[in-house]
Amino acid sequence: MLLSERNDELYRKKPKCWDFFRSLGSPKYVVAPMVDQSELAWRMLSRKYGAQLCYTPMLHAGLFATQEEYRKKKFTTCSEDRPLIVQFCANDPQTLLKSARLVEDKVDAVDINLGCPKSIARKGRYGSFLMEDWNLIASLVSLLSQQLRIPVTCKIRIFPDVEKTVCYAKMLEDSGCQLLTIHGRLREQQGQNAGFADWNQIKAVRKALSIPIFANGNILYLEDVHRCLQWTGVQGVMVAESNLYNPAIFTGIHFPITKMAEEYLELCENYSTHPSMIRSHLFKLWRKPLKIHSFMCEELGRANCLENFRCLLNSFNLIYKEEQSESLDLAGLHFSSEVIYLENAVLSRTKVISMWLCQPLVRLSANESYTCLPESQQIFRRKVLELRRQKKLAKRLKAKVCENYELYVPQTNAGLEVVSIATLNPFYLSPCNKEERATCAAALLPAE
């Protein structure tokens, strides 16, 4: 049989487009590919709490194709870990094909990462830094589509111009992409400057294409998933960072962080997990209490085995029990949230949740703090920012800040001068002359 005939037969036999989507179980709740974070143990925890489809961490095709040790460390799965899509980053079609063939009998599809915006992707020329080279991208997709026994999918970011984004997505569909995930942010939007994802661009692509579409971006809670599905008309919603802070996000429940950590560590015993991955997950789950109990943060940074992590969990359980009222059971509580309506998205941003419960990380710039939050939240955030400013000034002047926001005069330091700015949090300045006190007081006044 000629190679071209073999390729045609493979293409006819493998599920395509909507048949492929249905073979996955028509998933709506999807866990994103996350470098060193969506490993087997975490995927199994996410599946337990509602995830219907999971992706592996992003794998480097060049290393995967040539290094057996890399494959053993980075790619692990089991019979219960389905449906599963493996994701590769690459810029060479043949290398990508070689890597994909090593795992095509262990997964349901191969995804090409065309959205990573990190500096390492720029150096390696992959991810979103291929967005301008449509010929190369088309060759990556078409070769896998023709040569693999399983479908090929893609994950992309958007262009500033919606028409260019739509053309880009159509090119991928024409090249053989059977399912497309769209992260509704630009390549430049990342980290603290991530801003909001543009759901209108995702909606436009969904209307223009005939293949299943997943949306990614602006998801903090389960309510956001449902709003995104309704707003964009996509088939599923992919969640990345918010899943790391609440692996039960698809249930709509904020379980105690100690419960999630305990279940995760049990899975790590069953599925060998590198300590660095465990440590990273626990830093995210325990993010808020670690800010208060800083000694635990140092211990977690030094932990390098399951026994160490379990000891820390036991310590956290003791602290948790001491700090919670015996009459209040926080497990499984639901919280209402206010909704923000923007031009390109509908978001919930204002849940007030105990630090001992799983909750997303909310990144807001200083400007967004005042324009995208209800008035009550704006006032609270201004006070928090002002407290931080006071702390910095107090440290520079060797002064003391009241952490409990109450007036407290140390009995042994009678010489301290007290400065109270209206009803804002008071703090103490070291003895200084009249002019210095006036300068400090002026610096503490809230900006108009």
Image (cartoon, rainbow, N blue to C red):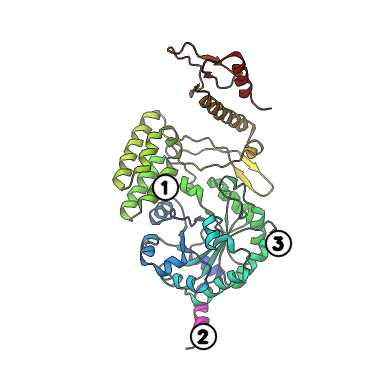
Density class for disc 3 (Cα within 10 Å; few <14, some 14-19, many ≥20) is: few
Density class for disc 1 (Cα within 10 Å; few <14, some 14-19, many ≥20) is: some
- Tell me if label 1 and label 3 are in contact, CB under 8 Å: no
For label 2, the residue is 5
Foreground residue among 377 and 60: 60
Density class for disc 2 (Cα within 10 Å; few <14, some 14-19, many ≥20) is: few
Foreground residue among 143 and 180: 143
Q: Which residues are magenta?
A: 1-14
- Residue 275 at x, y percent in the picture: 35, 50
Question: In the rendered structure, which amino acid carries the disc numbered 2?
Answer: Glu
For label 3, the residue is 163
Residue 326 visible in this rendered orientation of the protein: no
Q: Residue at x 57, y 16 (%)?
A: 419
SS label for mark 2: helix
- Residue 81 at x, y percent in the picture: 40, 60
Which of the labelled discs sits on residue 140, or is there none? none
Cα–Cα span, label 1 and label 3: 39 Å
Q: Hey, which residue is sitting farthest left in the picture?
A: 307
Residue 11 visible in this rendered orientation of the protein: yes
- Residue 212 at x, y percent in the picture: 58, 64
For label 1, the residue is 280
Cα–Cα span, label 1 and label 2: 48 Å
Is 298 displayed left or right of 408 in the figure? Answer: left
